[in-house]
Image (cartoon, coloured by chain):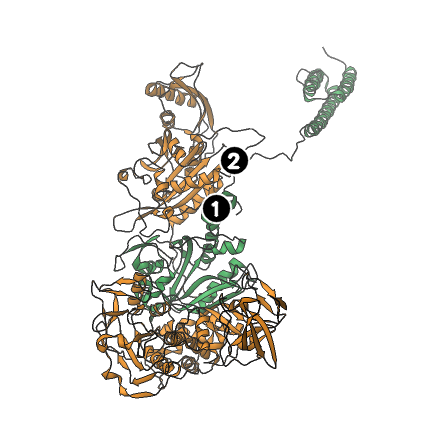
Chain colours: A green, B orange
């Protein structure tokens, strides 16, 4: 059946009008799909009309075709518009519906932390790594030779009193007694036995003392040893290195003191103290009313020690330093009892 | 060591304020730990006791009339020692005092005591805050000027010094005076040590024989006759008291005084009690005994150096005199000893007899061999001055091996090379000379060295100088460490070597922290009690099954406490104890880990120090939440942690049923990599949990870092990401209850194109036959070359099911 052009046009008019009216009433996507099938689907009136145009004479066909496609375009764009409106409305209503009490706690996940001493060690090591020092380690159980004899502290040397020692062996002579290292300095000799200059290492590690524990003394503690050996290394380099370290760790404003001190394995020897963080140098219990807190011992490696490491003291020179680690977080965080560190109370550890 | 600035001022005019002096000394190596100012006594003066009368109303009280300048006041006094003619500290009404009974500061008021008005007070040392002495009033030296304000007369500043062990020469007033002189460019005024001698020569009266010159390099003695034993003058007593020494009599006090002044310990023998007029310095013989001054009988042997007369020991050299030769009130002739003993001898002796004295403390540091004669002469003079002694002519000086003083070469170049400090040769000479060093006039210009060298000889009192570096320190510390420039290292940067161990440790730490574990650090030393809680049978080292029997951890010979007696052979004991402590205060879930060394004995060698990881989980799966409980911890929580850790380290591992005796036999596993057991994990054995008083389920993971080390450093290699889509298939397999998941998985994984295998359900129950279980498994197939077709996947999967059926009797769940 062929409809006259006029009738076709009329029908198109009607489809457009009816479709538009119905579309206005569509309120969800399901209805919208039905509407789409009804007016733009393969079996819709409009499709049928557009298909049947082929039977019209050419002139008529063009006229009706143009109009037919116009209607199709209008309906398609109306559909897109409606789709958009409905989607907007859907999002808006879903957001309204899903409003949460954001003050409810989230899913608890446990948080891990490093021990404050590990954190401090990392910080100290990082500063020295930045200055070209390499981290090496040594054993906790040492020979008397490395801990004492090779460091100019033979049997009966008065400096042995500076180190209350925990022994594994007693009454074994010739440096062959085993002990718990009292400082990280034995690593100086061990490193020299392994390497030739230039040497630039730091040695973190546990140390032990025969000592009753109280708020400021522990039988176990950490030290970081430093050793740099090369031609032309001077005490000025030592001072510069340690001042830079203090600046990094304690800040620009912190006053630092570099004074003469004695350790048998260095000559000249030195001690570095920083202005007390608790009283800012005014004097208080923390600093023993001196305004200064000693943080490390240092000096130029003693020529005898260099010789024991098979390094010629006429050609090479070097510096060494050793610092206690616990004191640093104690000063910085105002911790008044060293025993807290290895007591491992989570209420303490979680603060760092 | 304490030092009185008033005393110091006798040898050097102190021009610096005490605080500044303290700072200079500290910078130069002699740390002043505290500056205590004695004084500030307002309304107090020196008074003289004119009369002492009984109190009319009280037997124990007296009325003392005290003369002050132009004034006489009467006070009520209860002190037993008050006497006419004494110079005393007198407090006017209004003075601030320390109450002798309560120790509190009080203001002195005028008061009637038993009806008599007291117009002030004569004070004890305690009331002045000088010492704890409150038995009687303080008696001042007779030359104290009446009416002088007490602060002016008695005031002093006391330095508390920390003298380093290399500087025994600074353990005396003159030593400090020398330091001050060098720092300020002044001269030391040495005290007088000359005296008049009698006709008779000492040689005929005393002979000294050093039989053990290796232990006693020098022995000097003088002989003083006609001495009167009495108490020493008040000024001398006060000096000793200010050092915490108790005055005894003029003889003993003089020897102590000279020790404090010169640093040389001396000993006085009653000459007439020495048999045969002989002094022999020798090792004791086994079986010899001697009673020392403290009235203790001491058994001696050849390890002990003694001073003996012809018959027997009369003193333990440098440590304590014998009771028999002690100076008493009847003594009239004194043999005065001033000797040098080697530091090791005295150190051993003091430790053996547990006698640490001011004398042994000095000898132990190694005193100068030249000091004995100097100190002897000074003390001998004081005997003449203060004990009316007559000095026999000459001294005995046994000094078998006098060493030649050796010059040490030093140059400005050496100072620069070590200290980084520019100092001219003239300045170096000036500084060293100010410290008493002798610098050679002739500057040696050696050929090898460009800068001229000088030859330097240390003064006799310095026993600590042996090389050029020592001289450099002397120069720099006097010029000032604050004058050393600050430079950064400019030398060659050494080659950096890789340190896989540190890297591995750091990675594990990061992963464990990321998994929510708190790091702890426990003591390396532990107790037998704690270790035994781990087992009923012998102590187990971790992971070394072979060592199980008769294993004994390394023991400390001199432990401080039973708690810290053994070097830990594992981390478990310490970590479990830490967990127990925390369970008492923390109710939620606890996750702890430690990475640390364990110590495994190797005979007489140093122990093996093995690095381990140990981690514990306890409490609920997760913290209490409104989102609902996740239930109790179980084995698979621990396994998940271990798997995540190993995945993070890119280490492939498999898990086999475990046999660690600290873990539940049903719920524990061994972690295996390449056939090697690298660790264990599981639920803690109930008996162990009980021993440590732990509550709830506790999971333990332990990994041997040494074994990981060789595996974690493999090179990383990139494999291309497959571009073609993956196909995933879910199957439900019914297998025998005994079949392990690993058996199923390894068959599935053996097929090509299988890229992922995930178990997502495990079922036993009504819907499948008894004795069977069902695994629901998702298998992902992917080809690097093309998009897989359904047919391809079906074919593989069919073969897979056939193999599962043949191998394990598995069937698809219908």
The residue sitting at 40% across, 34% down in the picture is B689
Considering the image in quadrants, where does the N terminus of chain B appear?
Answer: bottom left
Q: Chain of mark 2?
A: B
Q: Which quadrant does the C terminus of chain B fall into?
A: top left
Q: Nearer the viewer, residue B7 or A105?
A: B7
Q: On screen, A297 above or below A5?
A: below
Question: Would residue B309 appear left or right of B532 to someone viewing this image?
Answer: left
The disc label shown at residue B588, or none:
2
The picture quadrant where one finds residue B279 is: bottom left
Looking at the picture, how far across and down is residue A168, in whole percent? 30, 52
The chain under label 1 reads A
The label number, if any, that marks residue A114 in the structure image: 1
Is any atom of residue B685 visible in this view? no
Q: Is residue A263 above or below residue B8?
A: above
State the image quarter where residue B42 is shown.
bottom right
Is the C-beta separation of discs 1 and 2 under 8 Å?
Answer: no
Mark 2, residues whose alpha carbon is within 10 Å: few (<14), some, or many (≥20)? some
Q: Position of residue B91 (x, y in %)?
A: 58, 72
Left or right of B54 in this view: B439 = left
Location of residue B427 (image quadrant): bottom left
Q: Position of residue B550 (x, y in %)?
A: 26, 40
Single out the residue that lies furthest toward the top: A1
Height in image: B702 above or below B247? Answer: above
Q: CA distance from mark 1 to mark 2?
A: 19 Å
The mark found on residue B23 in the picture is none
Local SS, label 2: loop
Q: As rendered, which of B197 and A284 lies closer to the eye? A: B197
């Amino acid at each position: 059946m062929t409809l006259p052009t006029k009738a076709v046009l009329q029908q198109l008019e009607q489809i457009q009008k009816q479709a538009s009216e119905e579309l206005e009433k569509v309120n969800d996507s399901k209805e919208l799909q039905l509407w789409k099938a009804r007016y733009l689907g393969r079996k819709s009136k409009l499709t049928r009309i557009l298909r049947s145009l082929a039977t019209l004479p050419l002139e008529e066909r063009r006229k009706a075709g143009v109009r037919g496609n116009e209607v199709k375009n209008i309906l398609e764009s109306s559909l897109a518009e409606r789709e958009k409106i409905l989607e907007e409305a859907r999002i808006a209503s879903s957001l309204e519906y899903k409003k949460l009490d954001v003050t409810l706690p989230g899913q608890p996940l446990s948080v891990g932390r490093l021990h404050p001493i590990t954190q401090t060690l990392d910080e100290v090591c990082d500063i020295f790594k930045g200055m070209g020092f390499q981290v090496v380690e040594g054993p906790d159980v040492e020979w008397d030779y490395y801990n004492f004899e090779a460091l100019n502290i033979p049997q009966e040397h008065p400096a042995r009193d500076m180190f209350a020692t925990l022994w594994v062996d007693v009454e074994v002579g010739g440096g062959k007694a085993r002990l718990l290292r009292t400082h990280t300095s034995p690593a100086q000799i061990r490193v020299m036995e392994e390497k030739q200059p230039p040497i630039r290492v730091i040695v973190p590690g546990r140390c032990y003392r025969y000592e009753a524990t109280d708020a400021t003394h522990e039988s176990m503690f950490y030290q970081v040893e430093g050793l740099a050996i090369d031609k032309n290394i001077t005490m000025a380099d030592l001072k510069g290195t340690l001042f830079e370290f203090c600046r990094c760790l304690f800040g620009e404003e912190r006053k630092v003191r570099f004074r003469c001190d004695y350790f048998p394995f260095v000559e000249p020897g030195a001690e570095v103290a920083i202005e007390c963080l608790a009283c800012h140098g005014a004097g208080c219990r923390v600093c023993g009313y001196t305004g200064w807190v000693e943080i490390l011992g240092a000096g130029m490696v003693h020529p005898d020690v260099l010789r024991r490491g098979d390094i010629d003291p006429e050609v090479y020179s070097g510096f060494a330093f050793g610092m206690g680690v616990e004191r640093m977080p104690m000063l910085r965080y105002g911790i008044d009892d060293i025993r807290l560190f290895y007591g491992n109370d989570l209420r303490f550890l979680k603060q760092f | 060591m304490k030092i009185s600035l008033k005393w110091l001022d006798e040898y050097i005019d102190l021009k610096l304020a005490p605080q500044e002096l303290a700072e200079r000394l500290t910078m130069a190596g002699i740390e002043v730990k505290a500056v205590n100012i004695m004084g500030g006594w307002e309304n107090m003066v020196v008074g003289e006791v004119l009369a002492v009368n009984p109190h009319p109303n009280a037997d124990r009280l007296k009325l003392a009339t005290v003369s002050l300048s132009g004034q006489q006041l009467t006070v009520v006094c209860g002190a037993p020692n008050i006497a006419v003619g004494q110079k005393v500290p007198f407090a006017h009404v209004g003075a601030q005092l320390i109450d002798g009974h309560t120790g509190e500061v009080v203001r002195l008021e005028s008061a009637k005591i038993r009806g008599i008005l007291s117009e002030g007070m004569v004070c004890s040392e305690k009331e002045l805050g000088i010492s704890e002495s409150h038995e009687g009033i303080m008696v001042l030296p007779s030359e104290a000027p009446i009416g002088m304000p007490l602060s002016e007369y008695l005031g002093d500043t006391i330095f508390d010094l920390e003298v380093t062990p290399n500087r025994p020469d600074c353990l005396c007033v003159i030593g400090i005076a020398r330091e001050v002189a060098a720092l300020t460019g002044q001269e030391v005024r040495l005290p007088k040590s000359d005296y008049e001698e009698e006709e008779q020569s000492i040689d005929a009266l005393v002979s000294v024989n050093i039989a053990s010159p290796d232990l006693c390099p020098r022995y000097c003695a003088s002989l003083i006759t006609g001495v009167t034993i009495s108490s020493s003058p008040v000024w001398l007593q006060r000096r000793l008291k200010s050092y915490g020494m108790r005055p005894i009599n003029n003889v003993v006090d003089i020897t102590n005084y000279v020790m404090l002044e010169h640093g040389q310990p001396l000993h006085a023998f009653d000459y007439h009690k020495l048999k045969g007029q002989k002094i022999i310095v020798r090792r004791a013989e086994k079986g010899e005994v001697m009673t020392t001054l403290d009235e203790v009988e001491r058994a001696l042997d050849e390890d002990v150096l003694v001073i003996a007369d012809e018959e027997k020991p009369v003193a333990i050299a440098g440590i304590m005199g014998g009771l028999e030769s002690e100076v008493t009130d009847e003594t009239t002739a004194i043999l005065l000893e001033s000797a040098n003993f080697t530091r090791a001898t005295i150190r051993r002796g003091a430790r053996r007899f547990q006698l640490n004295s001011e004398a042994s403390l000095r000898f132990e540091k190694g005193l100068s061999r030249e000091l004995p004669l100097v100190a002897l002469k000074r003390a001998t003079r004081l005997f003449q001055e203060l004990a009316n002694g007559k000095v026999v002519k000459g001294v005995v000086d046994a000094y078998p091996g006098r060493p030649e003083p050796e010059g040490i070469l030093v140059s400005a170049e050496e100072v620069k090379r070590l200290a980084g400090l520019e100092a001219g040769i003239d300045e170096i000479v000036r500084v060293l000379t100010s410290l008493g060093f002798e610098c050679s006039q002739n500057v040696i210009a050696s050929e090898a060295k460009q800068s001229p060298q000088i030859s330097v000889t240390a003064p006799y009192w310095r026993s600590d100088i042996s090389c050029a570096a020592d001289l450099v320190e002397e120069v720099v510390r006097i010029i000032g460490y604050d004058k050393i420039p600050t430079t950064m290292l400019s030398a060659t940067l050494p080659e950096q070597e890789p340190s896989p161990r540190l890297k591995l440790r750091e990675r594990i730490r990061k992963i464990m922290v990321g998994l929510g574990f708190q790091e702890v650090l426990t003591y390396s030393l532990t107790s037998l009690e704690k270790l035994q809680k781990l087992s009923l049978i012998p102590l187990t080292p971790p992971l070394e099954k072979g060592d199980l029997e008769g294993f004994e951890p390394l023991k400390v010979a001199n432990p401080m406490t039973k708690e810290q007696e053994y070097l830990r052979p594992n981390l478990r004991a310490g970590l479990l104890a830490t967990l127990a402590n925390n369970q008492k205060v923390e109710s939620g879930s606890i996750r702890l880990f430690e990475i640390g060394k364990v110590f495994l004995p190797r005979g007489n060698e140093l122990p093996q120090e093995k690095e381990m990881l140990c981690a514990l989980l306890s409490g609920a799966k997760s913290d209490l939440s409104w989102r609902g409980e996740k239930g109790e911890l179980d084995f698979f929580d621990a396994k998940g942690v271990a798997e995540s850790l190993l995945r993070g380290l890119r280490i492939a591992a498999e898990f086999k049923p475990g046999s660690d005796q600290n873990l539940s036999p049903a719920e524990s596993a061994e972690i295996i990599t390449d056939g090697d057991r690298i660790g264990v994990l599981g639920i803690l054995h109930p008996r162990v949990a009980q021993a440590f008083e732990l509550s709830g389920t506790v999971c333990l993971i332990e990994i041997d870092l040494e074994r990981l080390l060789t595996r974690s450093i493999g090179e990383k290699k990139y494999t291309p990401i497959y571009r073609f889509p993956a196909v995933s298939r879910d199957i439900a397999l019914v297998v025998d209850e005994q079949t392990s998941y690993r058996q199923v998985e390894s068959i599935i994984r053996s097929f090509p194109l299988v890229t992922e295998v995930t178990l997502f359900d495990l079922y036993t129950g009504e819907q499948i036959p008894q004795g069977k279980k069902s695994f629901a498994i998702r298998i992902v197939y992917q080809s690097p070359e093309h998009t897989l077709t359904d047919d391809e996947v079906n074919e593989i999967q069919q073969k897979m099911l056939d193999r599962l059926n043949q191998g394990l009797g598995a069937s698809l769940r219908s």
